[in-house]
Amino acid sequence: MNSRILQQLSQDSYTLVRRIGEAADDQGVSVYLVGGVVRDLFLKRDNLDLDFVVEGNAIIFARKAAGILKAPIKVYKDFGTAAVVLNDGRALDFATARAETYAAPGCLPQVRRGSIHEDLFRRDFTVNAMALGINHSRWGQLVDPFDGLKDLRAKTIRVLHQRSFDDDATRILRAIRFEQRFGFRIKPQTLKLLKRRLARRTGDHVSAQRFFNEFRKILMEEKIFPA
């Protein structure tokens, strides 16, 4: 059903994704387009950010992609990620599929290598927890284990599990930001969890810098809203 969804990318982005998918086939690894660009393709909104998850070693694969594209690469070994920097300044971000566990609310998570499904479970909301296959055998196939597309069509914001705001309190700000940006509504159960987290009035282990970064993103929205 969604095999043509990737055709909504700009011609330049489509070509890049095709080449990366071909490289994935050559390397024998599964690679997926993830993040906001997937959400925005279904919303028919422009998004030039191309983020990829690799079921394998993302750094090794990103080096291969950089060689094919003849572009420089930045490696973040501690995080298992890499960015290939294009001539126009855009970066193609590659991350190893991973699973996370939180030792305490708000702490940075403990990470291990995982599957695409485990990686999507790390996401903040269901509408951001979708992926599109880019290998030839699964080109444009939607991976949507948490019914994000259903929530997208219903214009709702929903967390993936009950501990979501406990794991990361900055998701409270992101929920409000996405609600206002897209004209969505926060689902009642998610709103209940959000309010319960606010009632505790503690930031746990979340740094002030991370909250500042979320406030800065709010201020960078096209229209600033009363939150």
Image: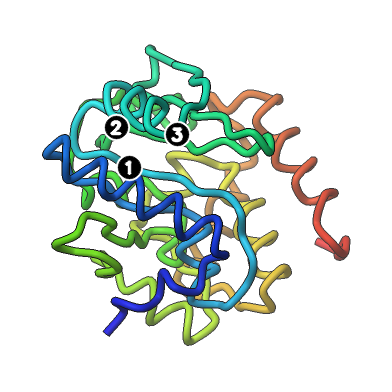
- The residue that appears at 69% across and 78% down in the rendered structure is 183
What residue did someone put label 3 on? 69
Q: Is residue 9 left or right of residue 21?
A: right
Percent of width and height locating residue 122? 35, 45
Distance Cα–Cα, label 1 vs label 3: 18 Å
Label 1: element kind: strand
Please, is residue 174 above or below residue 145 in the view? Answer: above
Label 3: element kind: helix
Percent of width and height locating residue 19? 35, 48
Q: Residues within 10 Å of mark 1 (few under 14, many from 20)?
A: many
Q: Residues within 10 Å of mark 3 (few under 14, many from 20)?
A: some
Please, is residue 22 above or below residue 43 in the view? Answer: above
Question: Are discs 1 and 2 less than 8 Å apart at CB?
Answer: yes
What residue did someone put label 1 on? 53
Q: Amino acid at mark 2?
A: Thr
Q: Amino acid at mark 1?
A: Val
Q: Nearer the viewer, residue 57 or 190?
A: 57
Percent of width and height locating residue 1? 27, 85
Q: Is residue 70 left or right of residue 132?
A: right
Q: Nearer the viewer, residue 218 or 141?
A: 141
- The residue that appears at 44% across and 16% down in the rendered structure is 76
Q: Nearer the viewer, residue 196 or 227?
A: 227
Q: Amino acid at mark 3?
A: Leu
What residue did someone put label 2 on? 96
Q: Is residue 83 left or right of residue 208?
A: left
Q: Is residue 41 left or right of residue 109?
A: right
Percent of width and height locating residue 200? 58, 43
Q: Nearer the viewer, mark 2 or mark 3?
A: 3
Distance Cα–Cα, label 2 vs label 3: 20 Å
Q: Of marks 2 and 3, which one's residue comes earlier in the chain?
A: 3
Q: Of marks 1 and 3, which one's residue comes earlier in the chain?
A: 1
Residue 61 sits in which quadrant?
top left
